[in-house]
Amino acid sequence: MISNPYPLTRLGYIPDTDERYYSFISRGKKNITKVIAFTPIEKDGNKYYNWGFGDLVKHETTGFDIDDKTDSNNGDVKRVFYTVASALSAFYEINPGATVHIKGSNQQRTNIYGKIIARHWTEIEPIYVVRGFVNGQIEPFQEAVEFDHLLILKKNVNL
């Protein structure tokens, strides 16, 4: 599944917030620094790690921010997605029992993530449990369903 991802750099861990960050450089038409974040969130009384990524941008107050709304059009979308997917493996090495939450910055992006999962299902299914949230319920992943968000858990842990 993960063919030729960009080299991933672990940026750090923030103990107070339990956040983990990784970065890589998208080397398409331009060199664009991308950041992947695993940020804890609580939803319906359950703790998840939101899996987000985007362009690294300067921010006046915090120094930097992740822009997950920009479409970079850098010509390397597959390699970027493979790199983001490789971060999931790195995250689970540290947090094997965590449930990862995926929700795009809009419904179209969430649907794209679902299509990518469906396309690589034979490689994902042996390793991960994938569920989707739809109509207020958690359901097994199905390609044709438009989920509000997705949940991923490394196998051998109950979801």
Image: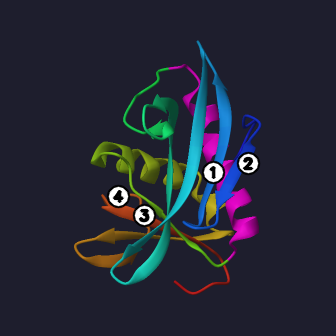
Vertical comparison of 142 with 86: above or below: below
When the figure is inspected, residue 50 is found, relative to residue 158, above or below; the finding is above
Identified by mark 1, the residue type is: Tyr
Please tell me in which quadrant of the rendered image residue 144 appears.
bottom left
Residue beneath disc 2: 10
Q: Of the residues under marks 1 and 4, which one precedes in the sequence?
A: 1
Q: Residue at x 51, y 61 (%)?
A: 39
- State the SS at label 2: strand
Q: Which mark is residue 21?
A: 1
Q: Quadrant of residue 89?
A: bottom right
Residue topped by disc 4 = 144
Relative height, residue 121 to residue 109 (above, below): below
**Which of the marked residues, 2 or 1, is nearer the chain's N terminus?**
2
Vertical order, 142 against 2 (above or below)? below
- Give residue 33's position: percent from left, percent from top: 61, 29
Neighbor class of circle 4 (other Cα within 10 Å; few <14, some 14-19, many 20+) is: few
The mark nearer the N terminus, 1 or 3, is 1
Q: Which residues are magenta?
A: 74-96
Asked whether the beta carbons under mark 2 and mark 1 sit within 8 Å of each other, the answer is yes
Residue designated by label 3? 150
Q: Are marks 2 and 3 in contact (CB under 8 Å)?
A: no
Q: CA distance from mark 3 to mark 4?
A: 13 Å
Closest to the camera, between mark 3 and mark 4, is: 3
Residue lying at the far top in this picture: please name it: 29
Q: Foreground mark, 1 or 4?
A: 1
For label 3, count other residues whose C-alpha is less than 10 Å away and answer few (under 14), some (14-19) or many (20+): many
Q: Residue at x 34, y 70 (%)?
A: 133
Q: Is residue 53 left or right of residue 89?
A: left
Q: Secondary structure at mark 4?
A: loop
